[in-house]
Image: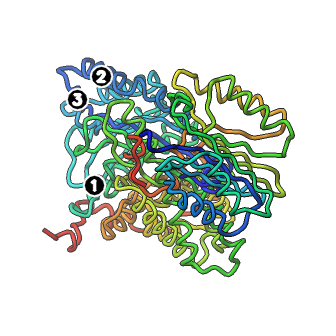
Amino acid sequence: MSTNTARYVIAVLLADRVAILKDITAAISDLCGSIDGIRQTVVNGYFTVSLTAVFTPPKSAEEIRQSLAIKFAGTDASIVVMAHHPKASRQPVRGDRYVLTIVGPSHPDLLKTVTAFLAEKGINIEDWHLGSDSSGTSHIGEITIPHHLDLKQIQDEFRQTLAPMGLRSCIQHENIFRATNEVCAIRTLLEGKSHA
Amino acid sequence: MLRKNDILRTVRMLQEENLDVRTVTMGINLNECIRDSMAATADAVHAKIKSRAGNLVRICDELSTEYGISIVNKRIAVSPASILLERRNHEDALQLAQAMDRAAEESHVNLIGGFTALVHKGITPGERILIESLPAVLTQTHRVCASLNVATTKAGINVDAAHLAGQAIVQCAQASREQHGFAAAKLVVFANIPEDNPFMAGAYLGIGEPECVINVGVSGPGVVKRAIDRLIETHPDCTLDEIAEEVKHTAFRVTRTGELIGREVARRLGVVFGVVDLSLAPTPRVGDSVGEIYHTMGIRNIGAPGTTAAVALLNDAVKKGGSFASSSVGGLSGAFIPVMEDHALSKAVQEGTLTLEKLEAMTAVCSVGLDMILVPGDTSATALCGIILDEAAIGVINRKTTGVRIIPVPGKAVGDFVDFGGLFGAGTIIHINCPDGAADFIMRGGHIPAPIHSLNN
């Protein structure tokens, strides 16, 4: 990174409404910032976004936070701006991507149990989604399982862990889902470079 | 990016709707195994099958774990055994079949196909030996399946071969009298036999196929039925073209699953991937029935006028979905109607709404033919030949595959119930109208010429 630039990680959380991203991107753009990574989602009516942006010339974290705060004045928006440290990135888990699904009645300790199970095995959670309806809850996790682990054993232990809670669970390679839902050549999935 | 609903839909198909890979079938060419003696040939056959298929089941089990999908059957299909039987005798034929059987057992596959003769234009001495050996082979082996091709659109119909096939069916049934004629359930008589069909009992490796190849058969009548159920729940007034569209989309997903597994198996075994055959192949389980799909579409009584149209709609939609999903679609790819293996079809026969004649009409628009049908034990070879000729005519004229797998059950009459157990299912002996009324026609023998539209070069 040039000394004439500064990169920040920015997170914003507030009650969802139309045009939040417009306000955020405008604030960053006004400070000559360029967004180079972004992920947004809405959970139960609350909007959250995490992004990284490079500012040329550099701006201070407080300057950026103030600029964003002006856009959301009068709300209880939570804004975090912190310097981006390249070495902060974790070592990627070397393994294959799997999809974990859990379906059944909701249970207060479920997420704690599942995340503890995965962490103990060194399995990284890449993404997680929880949905619920009248029939119960469904958890979908995208996880990376290290190559050295015995998949069958993981699956069996995972099923046994959740069965007493009345939950059905499954861990399957992501390609089965991509094959059934994406329009791309199967060969490209197996080569790990789908063009879908 | 995977979407939540897509993931849950796939999980539901796999866990609740019986989507599975019905068979991973390894094709193996045995022609290089010919030796000076049958003992040496049989040893070579056994060794080659073991060397090629030794890891098939282990790899399939690994993938089943990885992808969370059941791979129900692992099978082997070899090049036509008749090629190895030229200048051999009946004892040699049995010895060869036993070597195949032993290799299949030691490879942990449940069936091996390819005890096959292609006799649509003429019969060589080796092919005749094979046909005449069928009763011994199919009763003295456990896993060997046989097929005969008696007609093609290009060659016409070999009536003499069809008659021999009728005789072989009768003899197989008689030889397995204690098992209700079960040996006949392992013999299929084809017109336009596909060279890459992974489904038994008709699987064999065609002579134009690779030396070793993986072909995959996927099924999923339960998935298709539930898809139509959901469509009708949300759109009670949906039209038949909307149902066809839904079937097509579902067939796409099912086919993709098969190709994924097939290509992975082939890659890990270091062999060529051949085709994925999407065929709605039922099992006797409730929820895994093609007949239930017809019920869902509105055919209250299977066999009623309109049933053939329903079969045509389903078969066509399956093919269209499959062809979009993969460029490697082959085999039979359509809707099967194996009566004994489908509890809804079997019930329709029992109740008398589904007759042999109606089944024959349905085979004109489905992907196979008269499949797993029980007939009286005293049915003559001539009558069976007549049934084979009718089916062959449908196949030849319509440029499609048709097959006949009929079991004359010794000692049983129309209306009697027979249970083979397991995937072969159960059924009721069906009535044959005027069984020997065409005997004079059939006994003339010879050859029914190829149709005019075969002259297209």
The answer to which of marks 2 and 3 sits earlier in the sequence is: 2
- Where's residue B176, x and y in %? 52, 37
In the image, residue B227 sits, relative to residue B307, either above or below, namely: above
Query: Label 2 vs label 3: CA separation?
Result: 12 Å
Residue B86 picture quarter: top left
Instruction: Give me the C-alpha separation between circle 3 and circle 1.
Output: 22 Å
Q: Residues within 10 Å of mark 3 (few under 14, many from 20)?
A: some
Residue B393: where, in percent of width, then height?
A: 34, 67
Kindly identify which chain the residue marked by label 3 belongs to.
B
Look at 68% across and 72% down and name the residue there.
B232
Marks 2 & 3 on one chain: yes
Q: Is residue B407 visible?
A: no
The residues bearing labels 1 and 2 have C-alpha atoms spaced at a distance of 30 Å
Q: Which residue does the numbered mark 2 point to in the structure image?
A: B42
Left or right position of A136 against B428? right
- Disc 1 residue type (three-letter): Asp
Q: Is residue B406 above or below residue B100?
A: below
Q: Earlier in the sequence, mark 1 or mark 2?
A: 2
User: Residue, x 84% and y 45% (percent of image)?
Assistant: A106
Q: Is residue B287 visible?
A: yes
Q: Earlier in the sequence, mark 3 or mark 1?
A: 3
Residue ID at (32%, 27%)? B96
- The residue that disc 3 covers is B88
Q: What is the quadrant of the C terminus of chain A in the image?
A: bottom left
Mark 3 and mark 1 residues within 8 Å of each other at the beta carbon: no
Instruction: Give the amino acid at mark 2.
Output: Ala
The residue that mark 1 highlights is B160
Q: Amino acid at mark 3?
A: Arg
SS state under label 3? loop
